[in-house]
Amino acid sequence: QAPRLPSIHDPPVIRRPGEIVDVRTMIRNWWAFPAVGFNSILEVPVQQFEVLEGETPNDSETIVLPNDIFGLPIRPDILHQCYWFHRRALMGWDERMQLYQWEWYGSHRKLRSQVRSGMSRIGQRKISGKYLGVKAHPLRPHDWRKKCHKRLLWLGLKNMLSVKFAQDQLKVVDHFYLRSHKTKHAVRYLRRIVGNRCNSALLVHEGRGDVNDNFRWAVAHLTAVRTENVEGLNVYQLLKYRQLVITEKALQKLMWEIYHYPEKRGWVRRAATPDGKPVKLPMKVPGWNKEWVEKKERQKNTQYDRSALFREL
């Protein structure tokens, strides 16, 4: 009997980072089928970062991750556009000023005659490929950044987090507090979490609430390790570094920012109607405040009496 292929009607299954469904089905339906399958409960263990010699790490705690962030279908087309947006943004403003052949100083007359010389015809001396510095397609000062929709970057970040979960490259730790500023201790703690074959890691924290100066000094000399605040996380960094090590506090902040980003950009509906437009105010019923108006008029026109006013109230 052939094994049952995954479908949208699968029962709930607990999956941890690196546990994916049938690869053949996922590749055939890459644009709509999540790597972790449908109806999966995504769990990730929270590991203890600093474990001294002789201690037993406490890695019993787990976190359930949302499927609409860490369980989406992997879209390489979206990731490709997000990657080149960040790459061109890093290039920034180009100050290079190259010239066409007619912009160079000097004469534009014909250099020599080719009649009965056995040589080919040549016009100006300042021609591209023959004269140093002359370009057929010169570069002008311009900005390499290209436009990219914010919604595409938002989707790309969620897709990249799904990729990290599917490839077992997502590690959650309790915090980045170190008692010593020595680099060798930080390397030992990182090797215990990411393994000995990892060649790069991105360490994400949330402000100063889950990291101290000893940790910053310890990892400052590691060229393959980058520390980043959770607010500066993007698709380019997730693609550049193999392992993503994030604190529990930063993970909560990241999910909060992703969920509330459409509201910040004004993408959500302002009115809970089918067309999203606000409903017109209903017409007031005639005489709906008749008793209240009569009461106020009676209090206004009568002489001040504390007992009478108390009875009215």
Image (cartoon, helix red, strand yellow):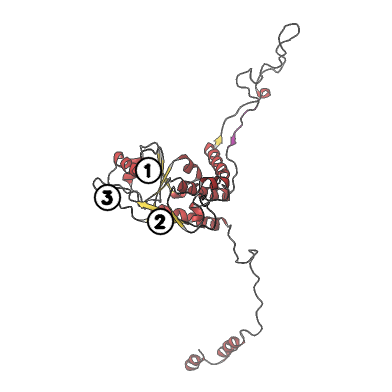
Q: Residues within 10 Å of mark 1 (few under 14, many from 20)?
A: many
Residue where numbered disc 1 is placed: 194
Say if mark 2 contacts mark 3, CB within 8 Å.
Answer: no
Toward which corner of the image does residue 244 lie, by quadrant? top left
Region rendered in magenta: 135-144
- Viewer-closest of 77 and 308: 77
Q: How crowded is mark 2: few (under 14 residues within 10 Å), some or many (20 or more)?
A: few
Residue where numbered disc 3 is placed: 56
> At which x and y percent is residue 99?
63, 26
Report whether residue 74 is seen: no
> At which x and y percent is residue 63?
40, 56
- Viewer-closest of 127 and 224: 224
Residue where numbered disc 2 is placed: 63
Q: Which amino acid does label 2 sit on?
A: Ile
- Tell me, yes or no, whether the highlighted magenta stretch contains residue 204: no
| Separation of residues labelled 2 and 3 (CA atoms) | 20 Å
What SS does tag 2 mark?
strand
Q: Which of marks 1 and 2 is nearer the N terminus?
A: 2
Q: Which residue is drawn at 58% across and 43% down?
A: 77
- Tell me, yes or no, whether the highlighted magenta stretch contains residue 140: yes
Tell me: residue 97, above or below residue 180.
Answer: above
| Separation of residues labelled 3 and 1 (CA atoms) | 17 Å
